Amino acid sequence: MQDLTAEILTVIKKRPTQSHKGTYGRVVTIGGNKQYGGAILMSTSAAVHAGAGLVTCVTAPENLSALHTFVPEAMFVSSHDYSTLVDVIQSATVIVIGPGLGTEDFAADILQIVLNRVTDDQYLIIDGSAITMLADVKDQLHIMAPHGQLIFTPHEMEWQRLSGIKIADQTEENNRQKQEEYQATVVLKKHHTKIYAPQTPTMRLPIGGPYMATGGMGDTLTGIIAAFMAQFAHDDPQSALAAAVYTHSAIADELSEDAYVVLPTDIIERLQKFMKEHSK
């Protein structure tokens, strides 16, 4: 097992002068029903603030005004517009699905559309509600796994649902066995988050703390991962992902010096400056 350190932040590169928004990837975030719109808004905002070139949010129409107010840099597609959904999936570098999506029939339809259309050269990040829905068919995951490069971002209870491994039994050996079975990378969110990736030693996050125990924290991490994969994964995908995980908690650590609780939106607001400070 390998502890992540600040050295991983060398992944963050200075931007070349000759570049444009298309240079930094296209992220599509899918989620947010009318009850849980905040989750996908935070994922979307984190992806924008962490540098993704173009971000499109596929969400319930009820969230449109909030989206344009909270993150006007993002584009909008209604989650009921399946035709446009297919178009934006096809053009994406990274797809996020799950934050606040819910588990209703229409949400399952959207998940199936994504699974059917993701391609080998795309990253698919499955979070929140999408993990819960896939847990119902976990015995079929080995045959229905999408062609894209798959990243699961569960907390311990979501991982229990998906893997069938009880929290008390989520050992290195058991978690690694399931990760290999699913042919995916797993970011297991907990105190000292662990990253299980194919043909890579397990990475452990030694930073972060209880000041991060706030709703939306995982949704924000998912957006940061999406942006880092869109920008930096072409050289070393696993290092790009690890740098995103480290960045999320490193910012929280800094903010906790003056705050009892660190909010996800606090981390989002600090992303641009933090990445500038660590760009090489």
Image (spheres, rainbow, N blue to C red):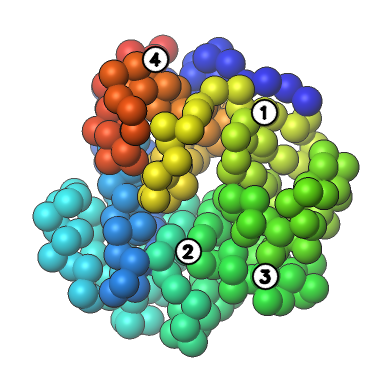
**How much space separates mark 3 and mark 2, taking CA atoms?**
13 Å
Which quadrant does the C terminus fall into?
A: top left
| Label number found at residue 98 | 2
**How much space separates mark 2 and mark 4, taking CA atoms?**
30 Å
| Residue type at tag 3 | Ala
Percent across and percent down for residue 117 are 54, 71
Crowd band around label 3 with a 10 angstrom C-alpha radius: few (<14), some (14–19), many (20+):
some
Q: Name the secondary structure under disc 1.
A: strand
| Label number found at residue 246 | none
| Residue type at tag 4 | His
Quadrant of residue 101 within the rendered picture: bottom left
Between 139 and 35, the one nearer to me in the picture: 35
First reached walking from the N terminus: tag 3 or tag 1:
3
Crowd band around label 2 with a 10 angstrom C-alpha radius: few (<14), some (14–19), many (20+):
many
Q: Residue at x 62, y 59 (%)?
A: 158
State left or right for residue 248 relative to residue 243.
Answer: left
| Label number found at residue 204 | 1
State left or right for residue 85 relative to residue 95.
Answer: left
Percent across and percent down for residue 54 are 29, 49
Q: Name the secondary structure under disc 4.
A: helix
Q: Residue at x 32, y 38 (%)?
A: 263
First reached walking from the N terminus: tag 3 or tag 2:
2
Label 4: which residue? 278
Q: Residue at x 69, y 29 (%)?
A: 203
Which quadrant does the N terminus fall into?
A: top right
- Evaluate whether residue 201 shows in this view: yes
First reached walking from the N terminus: tag 1 or tag 4:
1
| Label number found at residue 135 | 3
